Amino acid sequence: MTRTSPESRRSRPHHERRRAYLAAAAVFAIGMAGTTLPTPLYGLYRQELGFSELMVTVVFASYAVGVILTLLLVGNYSDEAGRRPVLLYALVLAAASAVCFLLEGGLPALFAGRVLSGFSAGLLSGAGTATVLELAPPEHRSRAGLAATAANMGGLGCGPLLAGLLAEYAPLPLSLPFLAHLALVGIACVIVLLLPETVRGARLKARPRPLGLYVPSQVRGVFAPSSLAAFAGFSLLGLFTAVAPSFVSHTLGIGNLAVSGLVVFSVFLSSTIGQSLTSRVAAGTALPLGCLVLVAGLLLVGASLWAKALPLMVAGAVCGGLGQGLAFRAALTAVGEAAPPAHRAATISSFFVVAYTGISLPVVGVGALTMWLGLQRAGLTFTACVTLLVAATALHLVRHPAAKRGH
């Protein structure tokens, strides 16, 4: 394995380092796209296998469980073994997940595919973010932060869009999306093999040393409010990735899978745009401001369910995504910059543990409520609860700014 010291990385030509961090961001995006690929397909699986809306959310949550377990057990592994090997492990797991879905072996295969996808995302969240940040030239560190978070959210958004388009307008709706992703994963593996290693003295045979939720003492003042904002924003993302297609088809009466994929894509695209705006706003302002915009988005989502109006749902996705992106990038950048290099991946992984708890637990609650209240009322209950959570988070951030507490 090629090992590159900080000194040799600084000696690399500027254009090579710029290409390297952008290539790493592309790998990150491809890996994350696979994690949301099944989103617009759950309706087809429900028809084929006959399971309930609650089971849809449980299948989705199994992915989040895989993410959280990976972050807790090996979230810091790339700090020792190196970024490149961990990225390759993540891509292999992504490929294995796609194979599970291609086998179409019923619920067991769906669960296996989602858990493997969660393992892949867990490895990518820490190692992918750290790789993009470390490959960037110092003067592009801010852009690299945007590239990392945009790759994360952009990849998550492209998965449903790709699957929805292929499932609606191409043959083999339950196979072609995963075959396409397998081809992209192969390209990503080649890119990783060409990237330089950024961990000095990386040990390929290093044994994982689980740290659980590890946050260095000097980061905790920044970590607490930042992770609260991430939890709140990811709750909205969980709603769209797990049950928005059901809202679109059952509550709004639109059966086009491409439309479902586009609605989900819109929230992640807006998140990416929101992230691009963060550099123009101070971190201490971006976090509470993002939460307030997120509240407006949640109110629009609730209104769309009440009025059964697709334009309101899209408006809610756009507004909520902007708020989530604005807060998320500010939070991740603050945590990443505050973390010491030797523990950066571990700290970022802990940050994502909190975020992915937000993307999973509330959504399972929606699935359970659907059994008693129906999909529309369950969605309204969810948006009301998360709106209160986000508003409380914004109030906390105004009273205890993350930027000030980080000094």
Image (cartoon, helix red, strand yellow):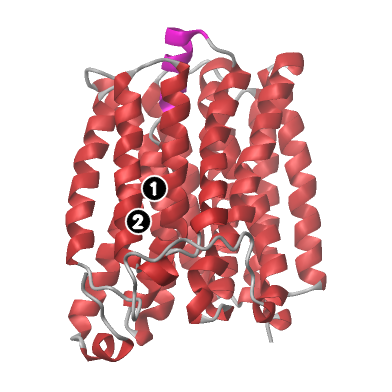
Q: Which residue is drawn at 41% across and 63% down?
A: 127
Picture residue at 75% right of the left edge, 61% below the top:
394
User: Is residue 183 part of the magenta span, yes or no?
Assistant: no
| Residue 368 appears left or right of 96 | right
136 sits to left or right of 47: left
What x and y, as percent, mark residue 142? 43, 77
* Magenta-tinted stretch: 39-50
Q: How crowded is mark 2: few (under 14 residues within 10 Å), some or many (20 or more)?
A: many
235 vs 46: above or below: below
Query: Dot 1, crowdedness within 10 Å: few (<14), some or many (≥20)?
Result: many
Residue at position x 35%, y 50% in the image: 90
Count of labels in the image: 2
Quadrant assignment for the N terminus: bottom left
Q: Which amino acid does label 2 sit on?
A: Phe
Residue 269 shows in this picture: no
Q: Mark 2 points at which residue?
A: 28
Asked if labels 2 and 1 touch by Cβ distance under 8 angstroms, the answer is: yes
Q: Where is residue 30 in the image (x, y as percent from the top left)?
A: 31, 49
**Tag of residue 32:** 1
